[in-house]
Image (tube, rainbow, N blue to C red):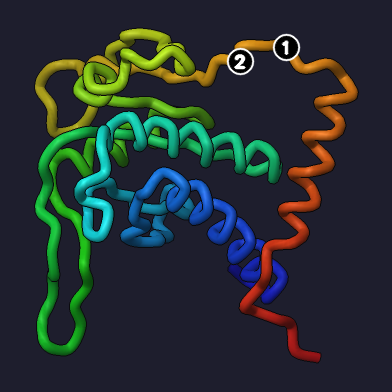
Amino acid sequence: YESVEYLSHLHRVIKAVQKDIYYFYGTMCRFIVDDKGSGILVAFGLPPFETSENGPLRGVKTALAIHSTMEIMSIGCSVGVTTGRVFVGMVGGDTRCEYTLHGSLVNLAARLMVAAKDGVLISNKTFEKSRQVRDIEFEGPSFIKVKSYDEPQPVYRPHLMRTEVMDFKEQVAQKRIRDRAQRNVPLILSKKH
């Protein structure tokens, strides 16, 4: 993160990802930079969307949408999705506090993200709650060993299914639309001369 140009690029990426998250009524809880790179913590079922149905399915669809958006922008992206109860609330003290999520499922999602290797991996519970849809195909289960779990965990790799094949002209037209959309994302940061 050494230049204003990189920050401008990062801002475009975050704006594009936010569109995918909000489309499926998710909440972007945190943007993280650590030894694994940049990451975003997303949750479903938080106010004002707590009554939205099927959070696990929306989580899978959001993960696939984000991965697709990053592919369009030529950025590698790995996503881990888990389902269940976690602590949600304010953490910190009088000087500094944040609204965040904590729990073993948050840690598992991070470990699935690392294991996904430029793809999407979902937990067994997420698979069980979202497998009935016809527009997503699931590969798996495969079993991976993850820190803090004694037994290897079953994981699935979801893929969106196309019901019809796009011809070449349609593919080119779709790419032009996506390219125009990415150019029209407004920036907050600007380079000073």
The residue at the far right in this view is 169
* Marks 2 and 1 close (CB-CB < 8 Å): yes
Who is closer to the viewer here, 94 or 45?
Answer: 45
Residue for point 22% across, 42% down: 107
Label 2 sits on a secondary structure element that is loop
- Residue 126 image point, x, y percent: 25, 25
Q: Is residue 68 left or right of residue 148?
A: right
Describe residue 5's horizontal placement relative to residue 42 as left or right: right
Quadrant that contains the C terminus: bottom right
Circle 1 SS class: loop
The residue at which mark 1 appears reads as 165
- In the rendered image, residue 91, in percent from the top left (x then y), is placed at 13, 70
Residue 149 lies in what quarter of the image? top left
Question: Type of residue at label 2?
Answer: Arg
What label does residue 162 carry, if any?
Answer: 2
> Badge 2: few (under 14), some or many (20 or more) residues near its Cα, within 10 Å?
few
